[in-house]
Amino acid sequence: MKLKAIYEMWSWTCAVRFNVNEHISILDDKKTPFTVIENSKRFWTADPFLFEKDGVLYLFFEAFDIFKRKGLLGYRTLAKDGFGDIHIIFEYDSHLSFPFIYEDNGEIFIIPESAKSGELFRLKCTSFPDQWIKERVLLNENVVDTVRFKKDNTEYFISETVDENHVYDRVDLYYTHGDAVISCDNNPVKRDVSNARGAGAVCEINGKLIRPSQDCGDSYGERLNLNEITQLDKDGFSEELLDTFTYKDIALNKTITIDGIHTYNKLGSVEVIDLRIPGKFNLLYALGFFKKAFDKVFRRR
């Protein structure tokens, strides 16, 4: 292991923009700045998803525990006049991220990215927003960045199967039939390292169904794409690229050093993104490394 990997880490932070109305989006306005949401000393945040309940706007995200050196799920409240503290809602044996949150028949669920566990599972909220239980395993496969979309009373899951190479060059489609989650016969329904891996929930912008995706062709976090979905059914999936942009195209309310972007979500007039901060020394991260190594040694005894 390189010495820098022990004490130096890159991180992510989220940013939000409150637009004048829901018709404005990053597709037509990249000049109005996003407001950077400060991380805490213990956690940095990425993969932001928006959810509104009882008039309160919530941001759900991966909360990377710098000391434990793994991703947990968390949230904070958002408002034009300020942001709430980070609250952790779920920790698992393995790393979690990308908390796709949705409501269905009065119940609220999260489908996190849990590929390191070897399964895709769903969390159910028992007391919003703090209490969640692992309710159901959807797939016993290594898939990442799964989003769910309901059409014609059928649930679709747009995802990506990964292996040890982590190429991030495919889109896989699943759908429900009763309680079963079924793989599309034509999987992978798309192959393109520059426009496959998911980057947020399917949203509607000016009457178009938009799927954010990542361009991983040159490097992880290099670019974001916004695609219009032109087909989504049990036979397959297709889309057309509308726009692509890098972190350099994003205006911010303050000057910070960033070198990547890989998530976009929109809810009404509010948009959120995440931004990668280059690696630097972090004492808590270094202490976490030595604690993990110490614990591993003593577990063997």
Image: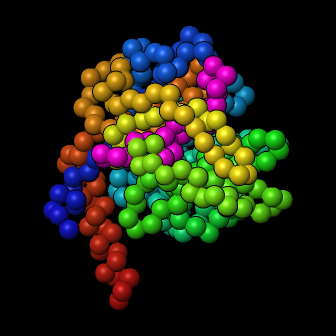
Q: Is residue 19 visible?
A: yes
Give the percent coordinates (x, y) of residue 247: 34, 30
Give the percent coordinates (x, y) of residue 283: 23, 52
Q: Nearer the viewer, residue 114 or 153?
A: 153
Task: Assess whether residue 98 is covered by the magenta stretch.
Answer: no
Query: Is 301 above or below relative to 166?
Result: below
Residue at left offset 67%, top offset 58%: 184
Give the percent coordinates (x, y) of residue 292: 33, 69
Give the percent coordinates (x, y) of residue 69: 36, 58
What is the tally of numbered marks visible in this picture? 0
Query: Is 228 above or below relative to 207?
Result: below
Q: Nearer the viewer, residue 205 or 17?
A: 205
- Quarter of image, res 230: top right
Residue at left offset 37%, top offset 36%: 223
103 on left or right of 211: right
- Quarter of image, res 149: top right
Q: Point out the stretch of residues depicted in magenta.
A: 196-219
Residue at the top extreme of this rendering = 20
